[in-house]
Amino acid sequence: MPPDSIATNDKAPGSSGGRAGLNVPLITPHREPKSFQPRNCIAFPPHIGYNPSEFGHEDSTSFSTGQAMNSPWNASFKLVLRAGLLGLLTGCATVTSTNSPQPVSPGASSNGVSVAPGGLQLGYIWHADRGNLYPILGVSGAAHYGSPAPVSGPPIIAAAAATSASSSWALMLHKDGTLEEWSAPAPGVGTLAAAVAPDSRILLSPSGTCAALVSPSASTAVVITGLPSKPLVANLSLPAGFAPNQIAVGNDGSILAGVTRPGAGGIQLGILSETHGYTPIGAVQAWGGASFLPSSAGDAAVFADGATARLTYASNLNGASPVLAPLADAGLLQRPVAVTVSPDGKWAYVADSAKPQIVRLNIGAPAPAPSSITCACTPQQLVPLTTDGVYSLSSDVQGQPAWLLDTRTPQPRTFFVPALPVSVAGQAGDTRVKQGSGAAQ
């Protein structure tokens, strides 16, 4: 018999072959492969093990074999007991390390913000290659796509959605130029406009209550206010030299536009509204993103210079003399590409494509100091998905995961949503959001 194996064949007096005491099977101590290197394992408390007094034994000998407690057999037996007890206490066996973020637990966070009490909490993402809006189910760090329902009518070529604590709504542009509002759980308003340029880009305001559709082939923007319940549609003349990717929309319908003038260096920034027309407020060398403050009624915004990495807080935008003040980033920013502002208006978040990171700054207060939120992606945008602080960081790329930023907890974090599987995505044009349908199937 090998030295590692211990067998007990002692017969009890008067028995015909039974073993003395407990029936102890042949035990071979487990040997881990040499390449096994456990990571992130839970340390087992050293005091947990066999205690003779717990089993009615007062000495240090084995209650089944008479072996000394420090014998190889009992050492193996103690390991078995420890492993079994660990399984009962933790409900788990092998723990492996991954690089994926851990999920946020449902319920209220330390600052009282409800993280994920139930239902749809992370909004919708538009997938152009599928012609669909897909709901993001789950919680931050453990999310996946749901399946939209089919809808009749012309194909959808562009869409943007917002999600609040009680409902979701979206603007969908059909191939025939029809602009439609969809909402859930209550049915949407329906058709809002016709003959909209099919190459229009849909931009939502920070709270999703206003939107603008801008097109490189049109000189006017379609502006919708009063979303989702009482939408009003207006056409707004755009200044010459505007670019559809240099636009920000406020909750009152105001537009901050970047304009390139012939012979002038850099980009001129101005405020465009139905009542005041276009009013220049400043300039940047390159567009680095801009966002209105959600509660400012279009009177304050933050914008970034993509070339110099400078941030500016602009206030009194509806007055005769706008005020521009620099925001210190503590040297963290290198190449800003997008800007957003938290729902309470206290924090600015700037996507930096060079690090990659998202820089968080306090607006109007020197403390706390600016901080960096790392991301295992290259941030390209900061598109609001929910009204309480979830943003899309990456543009839609077929077969690639979507990266999101969740700012609803004291420690904002980035996480990804796995790419759409074929079984969920279906064929392009075959599965679309249905008018009045729920968030997921």
Image (cartoon, grey):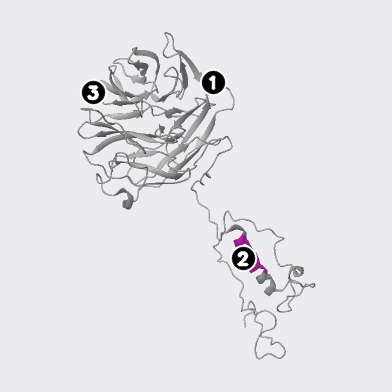
Residue type marked 1: Gly
The answer for how far apart the CA atoms under marks 1 and 2 are is: 56 Å
Dot in front, 1 or 2: 2
**Mark linked to residue 218:** 3
Give the residue number, with chain letter if any, for mark 2: 84
For the residues bearing labels 3 and 2, Cβ distance under 8 angstroms? no
Q: Which residues are magenta?
A: 78-88
Q: Nearer the viewer, residue 54 or 183?
A: 183
Judge the density around disc 3: few (<14), some (14-19), many (≥20) Cα neighbours within 10 Å: some
Q: Residue at x 58, y 22 (%)?
A: 366
Residue 84 can be seen in this image: yes
- Predominant secondary structure in magenta? helix
The answer for how far apart the CA atoms under marks 1 and 3 are is: 38 Å
**Mark linked to residue 106:** none
Place of residue 291 in the rendered image (x, y in percent of width and height, measured from the top left)? 42, 24
The answer for how far apart the CA atoms under marks 3 and 2 are is: 70 Å
Place of residue 47 in the rendered image (x, y in percent of width and height, measured from the top left)? 72, 60
Residue type marked 3: Ala
- What SS does tag 1 mark? loop
N-terminal of the two: label 1 or label 2?
A: 2
- What SS does tag 2 mark? helix
Residue type marked 2: Gly
